[in-house]
Amino acid sequence: MTRIPLALQRFGLLLCLLLLAEPAASRKRTFRMERFGVAPGEKQLCTRLRNALDAIRQQVEPGDEVVLRFKKGEYAFHAADAEPCSLYVSNHDQNQPKRVAIRLEGWHRLTVEGNGARFVFHGRLMPLALRRSTECTLRNFSIDFANPQISQVEIVSNDGPSGITFRPAPWVRWRISPDSLLETYGEGWTARPVSGMAFEPGTRHILYNTGDLPLSMKGVSAAGDGTLRAPAWRDARLVPGTLVALRTWHRPAPAVFLEEDSCTGLEDIRVHYAEGMGLLAQRCNGISLKRFSVCLKGKTDPRCFTTQADATHFSQCKGVISVTDGLFENMMDDAINVHGVYLRVEKRTDARTLVCTFGHGQTWGFAWGDPGDTVRLIRPATMEPAGPPAIISSIRPVGAAGSLGARGYEVTLRDALPDSLFDGSKLGIENLTWTPEVVFAGNTVRNNRARGALFSSPRRTLVERNTFDHTSGSAILLCGDCNGWYESGAVGNLVIRRNRFINALTSRYQFTEGVISICPEIPAIKRSAGYFHGGRPEAISITDNEFDQFESTLLYAKSVDGLLFRDNVIRRNADFAPLRPGCRPVVLEHTRRAVIVGEGLNVPPPTPNRPLSR
């Protein structure tokens, strides 16, 4: 046997260690963006930033930690020089292409350090997209639009059958169209408002018992004093001084878009407006939001609104989603919504293969699953599982060359499916692998439309130390819907503790049956033999919370197995007239193993299959 010299042995050992270790040249590289012409006051910032990122990529090596350091000040990004690209964003309009101002793709260990920079956007565009990146951090900047597509007006006079006179806010650019409708406009966009949200001018609370305002601008005319008169807009609830946010239902892009990222952190970021959501994350693994806020610009902000839709939204993600110490106010939908995506099963082509399509018009075109993922079939009518979980063997897009723009997928499973599952009734399919753990803690949610927080994950979810202040619908909603929104995820391990709920349910919206509303969409609940949420004792635990409420239902629960409501402090007030006089504080429908403890709750036996109010 040949003896290897000791020096050669040592060299071989050293070589192995070098190969196994982090790259020897790994460095921290900090780039001051003003040196690349990306600075406050500069023009064509989208183009300058693209060029800067290209130049920086040429200077760094794989494994380097890269810091993009922005100088404090105001940056004006315009849609005209933003990069067009095709991005299919869950729960948004799928118009293509979308223009992106700050596009970060394929980065590793990247930090965007804003140093308090104010990023202000002009036109219709997506402010920031981070895609297919790992261990990246976005920190310390704000996002706003100079001229939001939501238009704010103040009611000047309400003349009943004769209509309403209002004054647009100073920043609103408006005109009357040839067909006598109010039309607002900005850089590269026009809008015709079709709905409104009314706010109290002092508190910025949504006006009691208004919700989504119907409005008609037909025949609108201008007076010489800057006011407009809408003779067909009639609503006795709108007294002089009321602020109204006029809006469409379009949501083309979020402020921050995360897709297929891993280990992403966002810290000390404030979103003041976006025409879609504040943040939308899809197919991401592990996201931490610390002091990420969707908020007004302080107490003196003349606006009464923030984003057009949710503050934060997480679709088909996994890992841990942590949202802590944020402020979410005056947005046109929820503070947080966490869910997966149901596909509709269209047909079976063989014993193991299903052709499936996306069900909602705003949710399609992106990757849904991978080989090795665990999936489960479900019957939409009863929301009951159809057979045990299965494993994906292969998956390929339908109607597109790749996942980008796909309308559905052909899913082949490892094992054959029994013929008995296919009896002619509808089927859906959910991906159990792409479901996250969630921590939502220390946040303030206030003065927003619809609902405060939505959770739809079977994994552990913790909701603690939050304040829900005047959410106009339910403060917390657990849903699950394979019939309309196609947002998946039965809740199996949820703790709601040490939160404070202040005067929720001042208006009515879909699924908002209680301050905490457990309300899956089950069209044929009378045929349900099982339960959608839960599955064990105390699967949903609601303890040590404070409810400061006018008369309303505190807890509504439908199709739950394993519910605990105990040690909660309940204080009643007379701040508002009851929307439903005589409602019970706790309402249970089709529940099992429910423990409700508390003085004055007076919970009668569950009423099976109670028709839901809408």
Image (tube, helix red, strand yellow):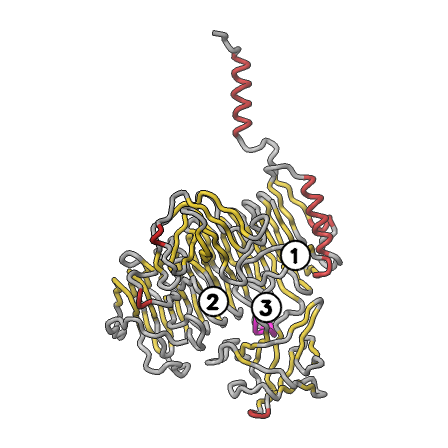
Screen quadrant of the C terminus: bottom left
Give the secondary structure at mark 3: loop
Tell me if residue 555 can be seen. yes
Local packing at callout 3 (Cα closer than 10 Å; few below 14, some 14-19, many 20+) is some
Which residue does the image show at 55% across and 91% down from the upper left? 160
Of mark 2 and mark 3, the one earlier in the sequence is: 3
Which residue does the image show at 61% across and 60% down from the upper left? 142
Look at the picture and state if 143 lies above or below 191.
above
In the image, 220 versus 326, the foreground residue is 220
In the image, 168 versus 363, the foreground residue is 363
Q: Residue furthest left?
A: 605
Per the image, the residue denoted by label 1 is 100
Q: Position of residue 426 (x, y in %)?
A: 41, 60
- 584 to the left or right of 135: left
Look at the picture and state if 596 lies above or below 182.
above
Which residue does the image show at 55% across and 18% down from the upper left? 11
Q: Amino acid at mark 2?
A: Val
- 551 to the left or right of 316: left
Per the image, the residue denoted by label 2 is 445
Q: Amino acid at mark 1?
A: Val
> Distance from label 2 to label 3 (Cα)?
23 Å
Res 465 → quadrant: bottom left
> Distance from label 3 to label 1 (Cα)?
17 Å
The residue range painted magenta reads 300-305
Res 158 → quadrant: bottom right
Which residue does the image show at 71% across and 66% down from the upper left? 188
- 438 to the left or right of 264: left
Look at the picture and state if 162 lies above or below 499.
below
